[in-house]
Image: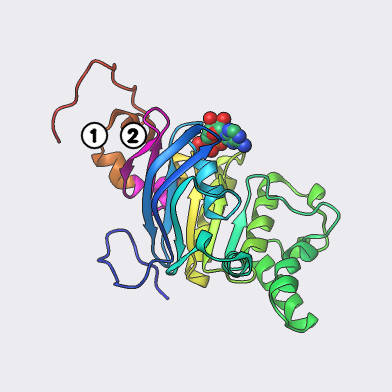
Amino acid sequence: MSPRSAGDPPTGERPLLEVRNLEMRFGARLIQRDVSFRVEPGTVFAIMGGSGCGKSTLLKHLIGLLAPASGHIVYRGQDYWACDERGRARLRAGFGVLFQSAALWSSMTLLENVLLPLEQQTDWPAERREARAREVLSWVGLEAFADFRPADLSGGMKKRAGLARAIVAEPPLLFLDEPSAGLDPISSRRLDDLILDVRERTGAAVVLVSHELPSLMAIADDGIFLDADSRRPIAHGSPRRLRDEATHPTVRAFLRREEPLPADMTLPAP
Ligand SMILES: Nc1ncnc2c1ncn2[C@@H]1O[C@H](COP(=O)(O)OP(=O)(O)OP(=O)(O)O)[C@@H](O)[C@H]1O
C-alpha cells in the first residue's frame, strides 16, 4: 500500500483514528480541551507542543491508559470508551506502542521480547513466530543481537528493539513516545528512516510525540500543536507547513526556533 501524505485529497475511507472534542483532566486540573483530529491510514501524525502542554497525557488517552473527562476517541468507527472491556482489549491489540524507555523486559533476550506480541496475539506455530521475530529484528538491523539482553545494548539499539516489538504483529496503528529522545543525531536519523521504512512495509499509521525538529520535519505528514497556556490546540497541519505558514507566535517559536513575541505585540493578519 502506498502511504498518503497530508496534501492528498481525502480518500473517503473511515479514518483509523478520530478524536472528537477530547477534554483531558487530572482531577479538577484541566490539561487540554477541544482536541479534535483524524489520523488516516499510512500517515505519520505528530503531537507537538512545549514541555508540560499535555503531549504524553494525550498519547496515554489514545492508547487507553487514561479515560477522557469528555469527548470521544474512535478507532475505525468504534468509540473506545463506549466498548466493554473485551471490545477495548480487541482494539488495543491493533496498537503497537514504543514507550520512551523502550520498556523491554530486562530478563529476556531481544528475540524473546519481540516474540511476546506474537505469543499473545497469534496461534502461529513456534517456528513461524520465531521466523517472523527474526525477520523484524533484521529490519531494524539487530539480527545479530537476537540473543542479547537489553542491558547489553546501546540506547539507540534498545529503541530499535522496542520498535521491532511494537511492529512485529503488524498493528495498523503505531504509537511512539519521543522515539529519538536521548539519541545522537545519527542514531536519531537512522530511527526516522526506520519509522518511514516500517510505514512503507506495513502500511501502518504512526502517531508520535516528538520535540525533535529535524525528525518532525522529516517524517510527519500531519499533526496538532497543543498550547500549555490556553490549554487548547492552537494549530493543525504538517510540521513543515506550520513552520512555513503558522502565524501563532508560540508555534513559530517552537518550529522556527524564533523568540516568542512580547505579549503586547499583535501580529499582522495572515
Ligand atoms: N498522573 C498525573 N497526575 C497529575 N498531573 C499530571 C500527571 N501526569 C502529568 N501531569 C501533569 O499534566 C501536565 C501535562 O503533562 P505531560 O507529561 O502530558 O506533558 P508533555 O507535553 O508530555 O511534557 P514534556 O514535553 O515535558 O514531556 C503537566 O503539567 C504534568 O505535571
9 sits left or right of 75 in the view: left
Which residue has dot 2 on it?
A: 251
Q: Is residue 214 magenta?
A: no
Which contiguous range is marked in magenta? 216-239
Q: Nearer the viewer, residue 142 or 13?
A: 13
**Disc 1 secondary structure class:** loop
Q: Pointers 1 and 2 in contact (CB under 8 A)?
A: yes
Which residue has dot 1 on it?
A: 247
Name which residue type carries label 1.
Thr
Above or below: residue 75 compared with residue 129: above
Please tell me the numbered disc located at residue 82.
none
Q: Nearer the viewer, residue 193 or 117?
A: 117
- Give the residue drawn at x 31%, y 32%: 252
Name which residue type carries label 2.
Val
Q: Position of residue 173 (x, y in %)?
A: 52, 64
117 sits left or right of 175 in the view: right
Quadrant assignment, res 178: top right
- Give the residue drawn at x 61%, y 41%: 183
- Give the residue drawn at x 58%, y 40%: 181
Q: Position of residue 25 (x, y in %)?
A: 51, 38
